[in-house]
Image (tube, rainbow, N blue to C red):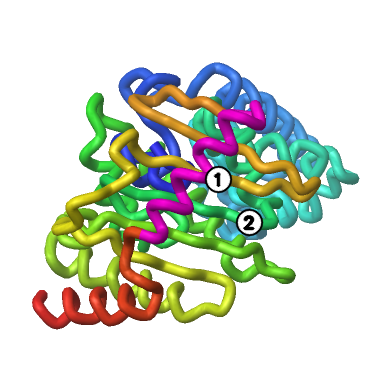
């Protein structure tokens, strides 16, 4: 699937391969377990029980227990606060980047890093709203549909990580972003009509940003160059262009110039076949009016 599309298949960040029954992969859980043990040692050294420590950092005792046992991945703000409250001298901050990476499935971590630093992101979506344009409700609905089922903690972790990824839309200088979305995606009521309405409104807001272009590929088109499936083109901060492909929880990051050039050419054709950005926003507004 495309980089922003992954989720229940498409639409979130992670297919079913690297996980079984909703468990984190070993590399990710190893980092969170190590962080949790360090957190517990520092808390005990400070003479604080979980309840008192939780009050100081703004979390309930059960959440602190989840962090210490590696069952829940803490957000960056918690790590900052915990390091200060426990007078850890940077011991927790040193793990902050690795903990943040652990929130993604193993196969997505390098792609997530490239996405966050990208100069340009071009994405073709065929099954679900791209992750960078999803609302929390839409993301939660997609993840709840995953088979095998995901643990509730994993769902909430993925929702938080997906929303955090959307900070790239507010970055300055802003990356140039282009999304071509199949019309069928905009009509699928994943999570219900109210959730779809929120998703369409979110897409419209993003499409009005100067750095973002959104195009709709109408279902009635007799010619569509995207039949090989979704993908993401990433121009890295070094200027190198790569292509990211994913299907059934397996990912491929293409770096060969000829292969990437072929994908880029295909994206150019897809864009020419889709509605223009202005036509697309009008089309989405019409869909909203029909709900």
Q: Is residue 288 left or right of residue 44?
A: left
Name the residue located 60 percent from the left edge and 20 percent from the top edge.
Answer: 27
Magenta part of the chain = 254-272
Q: Position of residue 236 (x, y in %)?
A: 71, 46
The span from disc 1 to disc 2 (Cα, nearest Å) is 8 Å
Q: Which residue is mark 1?
A: 233
Q: Is residue 235 left or right of residue 195?
A: right
Dot 1 or dot 2: first in sequence order is 2
Secondary-structure class at tag 1: strand
* Farthest left residue in view: 290
Task: Compare residues 220 and 140 and report the one nearer the observer.
Answer: 220
Magenta segment includes 266: yes
Q: Is residue 191 left or right of residue 54?
A: left
Q: Which residue is mark 2?
A: 120
- Position above or below: 172 against 113: below
Name the residue located 29 percent from the left edge and 66 percent from the top edge.
Answer: 199
Q: Is residue 71 left or right of residue 290?
A: right
Quarter of the rendering occupied by the N terminus: top left
Quarter of the rendering occupied by the C terminus: bottom left
């Amino acid at each position: 699937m495309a980089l922003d599309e992954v989720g229940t298949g498409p639409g979130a960040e992670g297919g079913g391969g690297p996980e079984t029954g909703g468990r984190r992969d070993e590399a990710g859980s190893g980092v969170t377990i190590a962080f949790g043990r360090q957190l517990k040692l520092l808390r005990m050294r400070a003479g604080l029980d979980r309840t008192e420590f939780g009050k100081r950092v703004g979390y309930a005792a059960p959440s602190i227990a989840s962090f210490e046992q590696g069952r829940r991945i803490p957000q960056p703000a918690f790590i900052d606060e915990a390091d200060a409250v426990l007078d850890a001298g940077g011991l927790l901050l040193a793990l902050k980047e690795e903990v943040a990476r652990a929130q993604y499935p193993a196969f997505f971590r390098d792609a997530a890093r490239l996405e966050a630093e990208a100069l340009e992101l071009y994405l073709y979506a065929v099954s679900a709203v791209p992750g960078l344009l999803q609302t929390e409700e839409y993301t939660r609905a997609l993840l709840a549909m995953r088979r095998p089922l995901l643990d509730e903690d994993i769902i909430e972790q993925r929702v938080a990580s997906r929303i955090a990824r959307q900070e790239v839309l507010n970055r300055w200088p802003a990356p140039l972003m282009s999304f071509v979305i199949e019309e069928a995606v905009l009509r699928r009521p994943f999570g219900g009509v109210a959730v779809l309405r929120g998703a369409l409104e979110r897409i419209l807001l993003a499409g009005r940003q100067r750095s973002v272009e959104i195009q709709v590929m109408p279902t009635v088109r007799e010619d569509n160059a995207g039949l090989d499936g979704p993908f993401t083109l990433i121009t890295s901060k070094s200027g190198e262009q790569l292509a990211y492909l994913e299907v059934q929880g397996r990912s491929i990051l293409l770096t060969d110039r000829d292969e990437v050039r072929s994908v880029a050419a295909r994206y150019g054709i897809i864009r020419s076949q889709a509605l223009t950005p202005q036509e697309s926003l009008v089309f989405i507004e019409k869909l909203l009016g029909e709900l």
